[in-house]
C-alpha cells in the first residue's frame, strides 16, 4: 500500500492529507464489499432476500389448526373423464386402455384435448413406442381419438368425446 504523509501531496500538491493511490482505494472497496458479503447469512448476495420454500398448509379439523402438507406432489387425472370412453378403451386389444388414460392425464396437464404426445405417454402406460402407436391406431379405429402421425416427431392427438365434433 502506498500510504504516505507529506507536507504536500505528491499527486496533486494540495495541503497535507492522508494520500492513497487508485489501486489502494480499489482494493479497499473490494475488500469492504467482500467483508459485507461474508458477514451475511449466505455467500450469494441475492440469496439473502430469499425466504425459503413456500410452506403449504391445510386445515386439520380434528386438531383445529393448520398443519403442513406432505411435500410429495400427487399427480392425478383431471376430469371429467367419461366412463364410457374408458370402458370402450379398455375393451380394445393391447395397451390401448393404459395409453388412453395417459392421454387423458396429458390433456389435463396441457389443459386441452388436442396436443402432441410426449415420452410421458410411454412412461405412464409402461410400454414402448411401437406399442403406443398400435394403441393409438386402435383408439382411432374405435373413434375415441384422432391422431396424426408426423415423420420425425411425436404424433398429434385429439381426444374425442360424444360432445366433440
Image (spheres, rainbow, N blue to C red):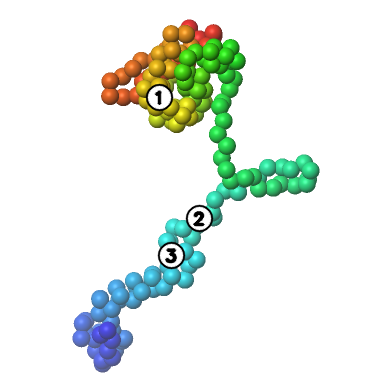
> Mark 1–mark 2 contact, CB under 8 Å?
no
Residue placed furthest toward the front: 94
- Where's the N terminus, which quadrant? bottom left
> Mark 3–mark 2 contact, CB under 8 Å?
no
Q: Residue at x 57, y 43 (%)?
A: 72
Residue 20 locus on image (x, y percent): 28, 82
Q: Give the CA distance from mark 3 to mark 2.
A: 12 Å
Residue 56 locus on image (x, y percent): 62, 45
Disc number for residue 50: 2
Disc 1 secondary structure class = loop
Residue 53 locus on image (x, y percent): 54, 50
Q: Quadrant of residue 133?
A: top left
Question: Quick one: label 3, few (<14), some, or many (20+) residues within 10 Å?
Answer: few
Mark 3 or mark 2: name the one nearer the start of the chain.
3
Question: Quick one: label 2, few (<14), some, or many (20+) residues within 10 Å?
Answer: few
Disc 3 secondary structure class = loop
Q: Is residue 85 visible?
A: no
* Above or below for 113 versus 75: above
Disc 2 secondary structure class = loop
Disc number for residue 151: none
Mark 1 or mark 2: name the one nearer the start of the chain.
2
Mark 1 or mark 3: name the one nearer the start of the chain.
3
* Above or below for 89 versus 27: above
55 left or right of 155?
Answer: right
Q: Is residue 74 visible?
A: yes
- What residue is disc 3 on? 43
Q: Residue at x 26, y 92 (%)?
A: 7
Q: Residue at x 56, y 26 (%)?
A: 78
* Above or below for 2 versus 28: below
- What residue is disc 1 on? 117
Q: Give the CA distance from mark 1 to mark 2.
A: 37 Å
Amino acid at each position: 500500500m502506498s500510504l504516505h504523509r507529506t507536507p504536500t501531496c505528491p499527486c496533486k500538491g494540495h495541503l497535507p492529507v492522508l494520500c492513497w493511490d487508485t489501486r489502494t482505494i480499489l482494493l479497499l472497496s473490494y475488500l469492504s464489499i467482500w467483508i459485507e458479503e461474508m458477514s451475511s447469512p449466505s455467500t450469494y448476495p441475492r440469496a439473502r432476500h430469499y425466504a425459503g420454500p413456500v410452506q403449504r398448509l391445510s386445515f386439520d379439523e380434528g386438531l383445529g389448526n393448520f398443519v403442513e402438507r406432505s411435500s410429495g406432489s400427487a399427480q392425478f387425472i383431471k376430469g371429467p373423464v367419461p366412463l364410457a370412453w374408458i370402458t370402450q378403451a379398455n375393451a380394445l386389444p393391447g395397451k390401448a386402455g393404459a395409453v388412453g388414460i395417459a392421454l387423458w392425464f396429458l390433456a389435463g396437464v396441457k389443459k386441452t384435448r388436442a396436443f402432441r404426445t410426449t415420452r410421458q405417454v410411454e412412461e405412464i402406460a409402461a410400454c414402448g413406442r411401437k406399442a403406443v402407436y398400435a394403441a393409438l391406431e386402435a383408439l382411432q379405429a374405435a373413434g375415441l381419438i384422432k391422431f396424426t402421425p408426423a415423420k420425425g416427431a411425436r404424433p398429434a392427438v385429439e381426444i374425442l368425446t360424444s360432445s366433440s365434433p
